[in-house]
Image (cartoon, helix red, strand yellow):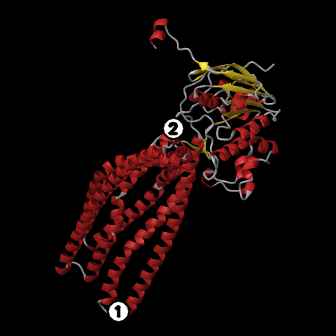
Amino acid sequence: MPPRLRRPARPDRRPRPARGDGVAVPTTVGGVFRLVLAGNRRWLLLTVGAGGFMLHQVAEALVPVLIGVVVDRAIVPRDGAALGLWLAVLAAVFVVLTMAWRIGMRSTVRAFSFAAHDLRQLTVARVLDPLGMARRRAAGETLTIASSDTNRVAGISWLVTGQLGALAAIGTTAVSLLLVSVPLGIAVLVATPVMLLVMHRLSVPLEARSETEQETAARAGGLATDLVTGLRVLKGLGAEEAAADRYRRASRDSLGAALRAVRSRAAYQAVSTVLSVVFLAAVALFAGRMALAGQITVGELVAVVGLAQFVQEPMSRTGFLGVELAQKRASARRLLLLLGEPTVHSPVDGAVARAAARTEGAATVTIAGAFGGSVVPPVTARAGQVVGIVVPDGGDAARLVDVLGCRAPAPPGAVVVNGTDLATLDPSTGRALVFAARHEASLFSTTVRENLAPDGPLDERALDASGTGEVLGHLAEGLDTPLVGRGQHLSGGQRQRLVLGRALHRPEPVLVLHDPTTAVDSVTEARIAAALRGFPERALVLVTSSPTLLAVCDEVVTAVAAVPAGSDRELVAS
């Protein structure tokens, strides 16, 4: 007799701090940025990268200064020895700035790549969390977050090292100008923060528009993925035009959001450029008047003009700090929404899972209870038996399959596996006992062999029972045929037989199939139904209304509509 297990209390289904690759899940935008910059000791790489970029910018800022020195100390006095000396110094500076750039680039690329990897690992860990996600997201939306959003957030590494390099360039320029003329240096030091403050204020509206742009793009991408995946079904229903209209609306919304964000960015860039040009023109004019008055030398004038031209790029980069940060914050918030998504299941006591795992030798499942609006009468499937459950409501049938597959929480006492209430089991333990294939299960874009049995050898019984052998006869490379576009080049019946073959290869002792033969002809269906009796080592549950499949079942039950609670008058009124 199986042990009697006390069902633990079910806490609130809050998102637990899942981990990906040993990395703790952040809960704030600042936490995401700290993970990118300091996680796994990335601050060491970023320190080296920032040092390399800063040295590069300092050396590059010294180039116009050295050219001015060459003019004053070699060209004007016509001193050949001095010319050779200062040209050698200039060449050494170019060597330093080149090596510094290479070191900075290499270290920052490594920091960025590792940070993006960590964020993707967190995203994948959350999507694959055994406790599930309360909200089902479209595949395209999840892919957008796991790819473009994680890369954009990881780009904070480039932002930090690049901005430090830009500040080093501006600082070197300011010091050089102070050495040439104190008024020029003061003008740069005063005007630069004022201009940066103005640019920061102008970038505030961009944050909201950037977030809207990314959200609408993700929705359009998800809709496009669903449209391509279900194209054959849409053609069969004659719903291509309706689906295309829906995608066009989503695409137009995405285009509108993108255009608004681009216009804002263009306006911001125009204002930033105008401010930088006005500033640089003022500096050059001021220096020219000082040279005409004899307050600075010709070489110093050359240095000032060169510095004014050089500083434009780092100042523009610093001016775009607000825009870049706004986009990264928007992506970080989208990532946090996914990472913080509440779970479907609640964590359960580990002792319950271990006790259930010790009873895995048997294969018995008892189902009795309400699933959605349908009530399933008590029915038990044991090893070697085939049990049929008819659920007239399609949504409730899908709900039942999701509960059996631990993709939705099980009502207490509604499903008992090997003597243990499924509601008390950890989802991972439940899935080790029961495999419930969804009716709309998809194939993967890999070979037929890897779709059927990715982790083990092929089972001839499963191939024969599912009718996969007939499908292989129409494929040029047989089991090694790659399925392009997740098998979109196959017919609906061929795809369904491959999905069934994959389910029959599963090792779980209890197998649940939901309408596995809706896309095959009656002869093939009858052959599959008879072959499903050939798996004596497992319990098989068929959630279907197919008479052919129900005819081979040892027991068949039919779900009935749940009776609503309330007074007689309320029931009559309803």
Helix, strand, or loop for circle 1?
loop
Q: Residues within 10 Å of mark 1 (few under 14, many from 20)?
A: few
Point out the image quarter for the N terminus: top right
Residue for badge 1: 79
> Visible in this render: residue 367?
no
Q: Where is 512 relative to 326, above or below?
A: above
Q: Residue 29: which quarter of the image?
A: top left
Give the image location of residue 138, x and y in percent.
52, 43
Q: CA distance from mark 1 to mark 2?
A: 70 Å
Query: Horizontal placement of 287 versus 442: left or right?
Result: left
Q: Which residue sits at x=77%, y=25%?
A: 554
Residue for badge 2: 340
So how many labels did they put on this image? 2
Q: Where is 59 relative to 231, above or below?
A: below
Q: Residue 175: which quarter of the image?
A: bottom left
In-front residue for pair 371/27: 371
Give the image location of residue 196, x and y in percent.
30, 57
Amino acid type of the residue that numbered disc 1 sits on in the rendered structure = Asp
Q: Which residue sits at x=79%, y=43%?
A: 464
